């Protein structure tokens, strides 16, 4: 960091929020596309949703919500200089994040198994609306999964920094910002759940 | 860093451990990053200009051409992509915004210097990808810069890579936006209240907002195009239930605001130049500041005026035509305020002012033709004809381009500490101005006559006008070469530039030319508005 | 008035709005430019050494917010109402199915007749229902100020009512691939009776033409030469007339023996049309392109017999 | 905007009263309950599911923003930023539907 600029946590958080704005608009674009198509093919979307495994979806929601909780708790812990707890919380978050991905991969795997994947011959036989539905399903959940992976990467760095005291009671804005990112990933999933799994 | 800023060398001199190229490529100094942008941008810019020039030559003959149809389609696509994504969109913010925003608000740098450098690297990465897309895969994309589905999904050319390049460039521009907003909120010098900021800052602030609110939409749209091409997820592909109109909507949701990303900083530049050379405060400071914000706001609500013939609902047609008219108002306000600022000033006529006034003239033509296109009954005729091509060259090149020139002329002494030959610049203005209007007004007439855009061969009745326009392009390029010739000469052989050659009163004129690494010896305290000549200047 | 070949009601509607906006724009442009120049001269630092420090004037700000707003809204309203007229087809309009594909147009009439050029009776409303078989295309008739995109999996409709006889260009306005600029055709506006004669005149009724008498001059379907039959079937006659009227391609009337200017590579050459030339022109149309025409002719597969028939027929067309 | 802090003065300017573990755990429980309701509704019938989607989901998101993401404890600027963003998305949405809803 160029030495002459003084540390500005407020600015750092503002910057992070602005970045989150771009993320929100990015997914916003997809949600707009989703509603456009859903408006066009209400029935097909209904059927498409019925084919998804709602239980897995809900379990994943709980997993992510909990992981979000543990991140904030980690911040509280840091604010109170309780390093051990902070590490524990962050660890849990990472574990939960991985769980999410595992479940998701099973879910996708099942779909592939039933010949439901982009460009699949089986998909081509479905009515246009369902083709679009699954197109969106794979795109949106896939992109979200990508964000989870990135989030995990960032959080593991945070874990490392907490362990090595790069993040301390008096300077933890990086942890806060990574937390913000993780929460946003969570929020996006909060929307994906009803849109795809509970639509039916 | 040294606290005795008085002994500080210019930012052009390497301090620190690294030297030469390595020092530049790893710099976090906003001024050096600005120059990195300028130089790299110039390269791409001249490539695109060259292509544009060749396109004119192609139109010299009616049927038997000097390139094949495929090449021509690739040419206007590449020309458009480079000009938009590598030149006008990043142009003014990345070069002059980076260089002067911190100085104008009395800061030592932007909020996130390293992110600033990162976004330059994204810019270069995007550029390289764009260039690669010309030679790899199925060859240069041939869809036009708008990448309309389903053609962009079906064509064999290397659309995927080109589109990915645009995606990366979008990322670069978002990071710049984030950086500027945070900088303006956090780094203003003591006493630099919002309404004491020079108008350039307001322009950059509103631009930055568009950058972060609109760019992600095109980012995701382009990602979808790539996914379609590789995995056929079929959201835009009618054979899979997708909808081409959805693509057009998503594309223009970004790409119309993008045109205001191009013009707002240009307007900011003009608002800086005019007071300096009239030696009086700008007329209606707040009106101009707010009109920038309202352009940013309303400008995001008019995108579908690019789709009037696509078969949208009547309701949408009505709404978007109406909003298009509304968005023209703030621009009008600006124009009138600029002109009134000349009134009872004490005008010191210098090259920057000449180009600023040229901007106003050309931008008005561009803008007024824009209004014509916004009127539904007229749009049906001129949509996707050369009239449109004329319109956007007037606003983008006559507008943003000329402002870019004006900014170069205005800040050149500050940036490089050298002065150019004013005579040479005046001399270059004439061919540029004449050529410009021959070329692009010619195009508009062609459009009215019914010459569609993106046409490789044109029907005989359009021929003579095409020849006329082409001749114009020769003058234009001549003028351009003289212009940059003069500036290049000045960089190497020019005589020393003073600290305040134009008698300006904004902060950049209170520091040495070229500025020292940390801009200010100690952060100034601001006590009054930006353009107060009465108080003898010194902010 | 006839401005830039105004040939339909829609054109009049569109141009009216254009002139309104254009007028306003010219006024404002001149006003602004004149002011700039005057101020620059009048308040040059020599004439006016000290600038008066004016910050602004609320009244003026309001004026130049409201006045342009009102004008712009009037432009919107005028444009909108005229557009409504241009887009809403009247009930009694004859509906024509237009199909766009890379890179040609085809037109189908209510009675199933199909053509490559669009025949329209003068002074009658014609509704066009535009579809696309592949990419997005744009159906554009400059002289009618008529444009509507052809979007796959959608049908967009508009209408026109021609006010002038003659043939008018149809162009594709949306980039749709390498031959986008060759995706041309013609609207041929003919007198109503000529249109009727063709429309109701069964399978191989001769194409109607702008000047009514020419119709009767045509050989009646009965004693129609084999060559013409083949050409009709191969679609040649969609682009070529045999009565001296240029369509997408040049007329074939009196072609044989004529001196024809053609472009070969870069150069213009003048050739005398002999049998060899005819065969070349048909089998490899791009080799020599007639001056003043786009290289738009497809090379249609013909077996030698057909070719001979056609050539001999063309020779006979004095 | 009121915040006009010179970088030198700017430091970790967090309000002193940091919320404790308890607050967040409570929020978390609420979130789980809301998810439960959502699932429940979706089993009743389509219309309920949609209504649940339209009401409960934003509520959940709001909670996460407000507490987990500390919006509650941040100055107005941050809230404005979010509102502007959501507003923009909403308008994009509305204008887009002015097309398809009336085709
Ligand atoms: C710098 C970029 C820039 C800017 C600033 C503008 C400004 C405007 N543009 Fe333009 N536009 C483009 C870049 C830009 N445009 C591009 C690149 C395209 C083509 C994209 C593609 O298809 O490839 C395009 C296309 C385009 C279209 C679609 C055309 C078509 O394809 O059918 C329309 C339609 O409404 C339009 C309208 C406008 C309007 C109303 C403004 C207004 O903002 C203009 C406002 C300014 C003025 C009005 C002048 C000053 C005012 C006065 C002097 C007041 C007095 C005047 C009166 C009272 C009449 N533009
Ligand atoms: C800023 C944008 C910009 C600029 C400067 C130009 C410059 C030129 N353009 Fe433009 N053009 C576009 C943006 C631009 N173009 C876009 C977006 C399209 C649409 C593509 C598509 O259809 O998809 C297009 C399409 C387009 C076409 C239509 C192709 C077709 O539809 O068939 C043609 C036709 O001749 C053309 C010609 C030219 C020429 C001759 C030049 C120049 O060569 C004229 C000479 C140039 C100069 C004299 C320099 C200009 C200087 C500045 C702008 C300031 C630079 C500042 C610094 C260098 C620091 N361009
Ligand atoms: Cu069809 Cu262009
Ligand atoms: Cu636009």
Image (cartoon, coloured by chain):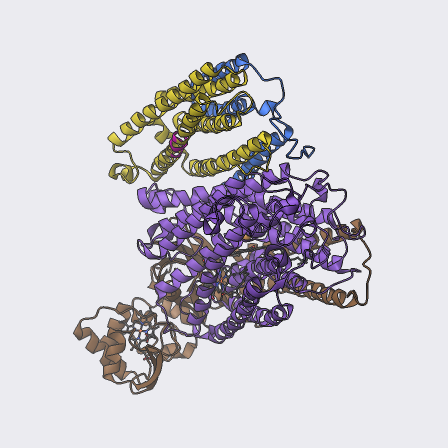
Residue C148 left/right relative to B275: left
| Percent position of residue B252, x then y | 50, 48
Res. C174 visible in picture: no
Q: Total marks drawn?
A: 0
- The prevailing secondary structure element of the residues shown in magenta is helix
- Please give the range of residues in magenta: A143-149
Residue B348 left/right relative to A199: right
Q: Is residue C316 above or below residue B157?
A: below
Q: Quadrant of the C terminus of chain C?
A: bottom left
Please, which residue is most extreme toward the top here?
D22
Query: Which residue is nearer to you in this view: B139 or B255?
Result: B139
Residue C224 left/right relative to C96: left
Chain seen in purple: B
Q: Colour of chain C?
A: brown
| Percent position of residue A15, x then y | 55, 35
Q: Is residue A13 above or below residue C118?
A: above
Chain seen in blue: D
The quarter of the picture where residue C9 lies is bottom right
Asked whether A179 falls inside the magenta stretch, the response is: no
The quarter of the picture where residue A44 lies is top left
Q: Colour of chain A?
A: yellow
Q: Name the residue rendered at 38%, 75% in the picture.
A: C293
Query: Which residue is nearer to you in this view: B238 or B105?
Result: B105
């Amino acid at each position: 960091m160029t030495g002459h600029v003084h540390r500005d946590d407020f600015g750092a958080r503002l910057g992070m929020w602005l970045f989150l704005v771009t993320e929100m608009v990015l997914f916003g674009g997809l949600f707009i596309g989703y509603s456009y198509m859903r408006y066009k093919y209400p029935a097909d979307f209904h059927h498409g949703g019925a084919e998804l495994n709602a239980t897995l979806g809900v379990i994943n929601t709980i997993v992510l919500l909990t992981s979000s909780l543990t991140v904030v708790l980690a911040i509280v812990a840091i604010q109170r200089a309780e390093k051990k707890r902070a590490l524990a919380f962050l660890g849990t978050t990472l574990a939960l994040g991985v769980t999410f991905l595992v479940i998701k991969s099973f879910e996708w795997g099942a779909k592939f198994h039933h010949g439901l994947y982009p460009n699949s011959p089986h998909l081509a036989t479905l009515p246009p609306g369902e083709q679009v539905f699954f197109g969106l399903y794979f795109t949106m959940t896939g992109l979200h999964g990508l964000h989870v992976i990135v989030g995990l990467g960032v959080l593991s760095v945070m874990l490392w920094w907490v362990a090595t005291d790069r993040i301390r009671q008096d300077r933890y804005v990086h942890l806060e910002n990574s937390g913000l990112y993780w929460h946003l990933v969570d929020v996006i999933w909060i929307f994906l759940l009803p849109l795809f799994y509970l639509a039916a | 860093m040294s606290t005795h800023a008085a002994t500080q060398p210019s930012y052009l001199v390497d301090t620190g451990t690294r030297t030469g190229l390595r020092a530049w490529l790893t710099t976090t100094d906003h001024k050096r990053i600005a120059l990195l942008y300028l130089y790299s941008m110039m390269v791409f810019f001249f490539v695109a200009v060259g292509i544009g020039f060749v396109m004119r030559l192609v139109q010299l003959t009616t049927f038997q051409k000097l390139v094949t149809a495929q090449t021509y389609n690739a040419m206007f696509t590449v020309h458009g992509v480079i000009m938009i994504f590598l030149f006008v969109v990043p142009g003014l913010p990345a070069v002059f915004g980076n260089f002067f925003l911190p100085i104008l608000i009395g800061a030592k740098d932007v909020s996130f210097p390293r992110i600033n450098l990162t976004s330059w690297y994204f810019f270069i990465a995007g550029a390289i990808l764009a260039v690669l897309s010309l030679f790899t895969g199925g060859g240069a994309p041939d869809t036009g810069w708008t990448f309309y589905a389903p053609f962009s999904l079906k064509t064999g050319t290397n659309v995927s890579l080109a589109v990915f390049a645009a995606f990366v460039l979008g990322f670069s521009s978002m990071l710049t936006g984030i950086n500027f907003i945070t900088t303006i909120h956090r780094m203003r010098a003591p006493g630099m209240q919002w309404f004491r900021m020079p108008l350039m800052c307001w322009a950059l602030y509103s631009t930055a907002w568009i950058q972060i609110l609109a760019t992600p939409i095109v980012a995701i749209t382009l990602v979808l195009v790539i996914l379609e091409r590789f995995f056929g997820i079929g959201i835009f592909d009618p054979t899979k239930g997708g909808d081409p109109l959805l693509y057009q909507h998503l594309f223009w949701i970004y790409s119309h605001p993008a045109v205001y990303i191009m013009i707002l900083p240009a307007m900011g530049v003009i608002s800086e130049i005019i007071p300096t050379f009239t030696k009086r405060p700008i007329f209606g400071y707040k009106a101009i500041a707010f009109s920038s914000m309202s352009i940013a706001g309303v400008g995001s609500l008019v995108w579908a005026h690019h789709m009037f013939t696509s078969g949208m609902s009547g309701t949408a047609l009505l709404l978007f035509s109406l909003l298009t008219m509304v968005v023209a108002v703030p621009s009008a306000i600006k124009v009138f305020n600029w002109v009134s600022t000349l009134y009872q000033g004490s005008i010191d006529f210098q090259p920057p002012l000449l180009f600023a006034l040229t901007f106003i003239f050309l931008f008005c033509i561009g803008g007024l033709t824009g209004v014509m296109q916004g009127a539904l009954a007229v749009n049906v005729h001129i949509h996707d004809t050369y009239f449109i091509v004329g319109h956007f060259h007037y606003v983008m090149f006559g507008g943003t381009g000329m402002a870019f020139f004006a900014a170069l002329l205005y800040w050149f002494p500050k940036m490089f500490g050298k002065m150019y030959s004013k005579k040479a610049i005046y001399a270059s203005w004439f061919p540029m101005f004449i050529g410009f209007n021959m070329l692009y007004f010619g195009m508009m007439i062609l459009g009215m006559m019914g010459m569609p855009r993106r046409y490789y061969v044109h029907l005989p009745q359009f021929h003579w006008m095409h020849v006329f326009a082409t001749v114009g392009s020769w003058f234009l390029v001549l003028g351009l070469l003289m212009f940059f010739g003069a500036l290049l000469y000045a960089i190497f052989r020019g005589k020393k530039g003073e600290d305040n050659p134009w008698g300006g009163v904004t902060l950049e004129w209170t520091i040495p030319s070229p500025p020292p690494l940390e801009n200010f010896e100690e952060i100034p305290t601001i006590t009054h508005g930006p353009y107060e000549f009465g108080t003898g200047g010194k902010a | 008035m006839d401005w830039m070949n105004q040939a339909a009601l829609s054109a009049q509607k569109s141009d009216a709005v254009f002139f309104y906006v254009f007028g306003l724009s010219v006024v404002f442009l001149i006003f602004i430019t004149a002011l700039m120049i005057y101020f620059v001269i009048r308040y040059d630092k020599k004439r006016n050494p000290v600038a008066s420090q004016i910050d602004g004037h609320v009244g003026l700000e309001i004026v130049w917010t409201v006045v342009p707003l009102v004008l712009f809204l009037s432009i919107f309203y005028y444009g909108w109402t005229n557009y409504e007229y241009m887009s809403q087809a009247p009930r009694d309009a004859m509906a024509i199915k237009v199909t766009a594909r890379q890179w040609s147009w085809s037109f189908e009439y209510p009675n199933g007749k199909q053509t490559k050029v669009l025949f329209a009776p003068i002074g009658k409303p014609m509704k066009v229902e535009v579809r696309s078989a592949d990419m997005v295309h744009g159906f554009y008739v400059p002289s009618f100020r008529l444009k509507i995109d052809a979007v796959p999996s959608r049908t967009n409709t508009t209408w026109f009512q021609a006010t002038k006889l003659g043939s008018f260009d149809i162009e594709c306005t949306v980039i749709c691939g390498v031959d986008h600029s060759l995706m041309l055709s013609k609207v041929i506006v003919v007198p109503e009776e000529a249109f009727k004669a063709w429309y109701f005149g069964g399978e191989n009724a001769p194409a109607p033409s702008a000047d009514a008498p020419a119709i009767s001059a045509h050989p009646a379907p009965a004693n129609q030469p084999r060559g013409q039959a083949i050409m009709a079937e191969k679609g040649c006659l969609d682009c070529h007339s045999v009565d001296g009227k240029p369509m997408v391609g040049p007329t074939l009337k009196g072609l044989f023996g004529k001196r024809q200017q053609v472009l070969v590579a870069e150069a213009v050459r003048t050739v005398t049309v002999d049998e060899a030339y005819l065969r070349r022109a048909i089998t490899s149309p791009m080799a020599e392109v007639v001056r003043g025409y786009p290289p738009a002719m497809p090379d249609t597969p013909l077996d030698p017999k057909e070719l001979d028939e056609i050539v001999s027929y063309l020779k006979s067309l004095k | 905007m009121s915040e006009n802090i010179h970088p030198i003065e700017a430091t970790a300017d967090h309000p002193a009263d940091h919320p404790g573990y308890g607050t967040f755990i409570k929020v978390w429980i609420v979130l789980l309950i809301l998810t439960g309701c959502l699932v429940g509704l979706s089993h009743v019938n389509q219309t309920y599911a949609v209504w649940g989607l339209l009401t409960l989901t934003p509520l959940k998101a709001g909670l996460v923003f407000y507490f987990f993401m500390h919006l509650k404890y941040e100055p107005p600027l941050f809230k404005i930023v979010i509102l502007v963003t959501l507003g923009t998305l909403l308008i994009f949405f509305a204008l887009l539907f002015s097309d398809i809803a009336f085709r």
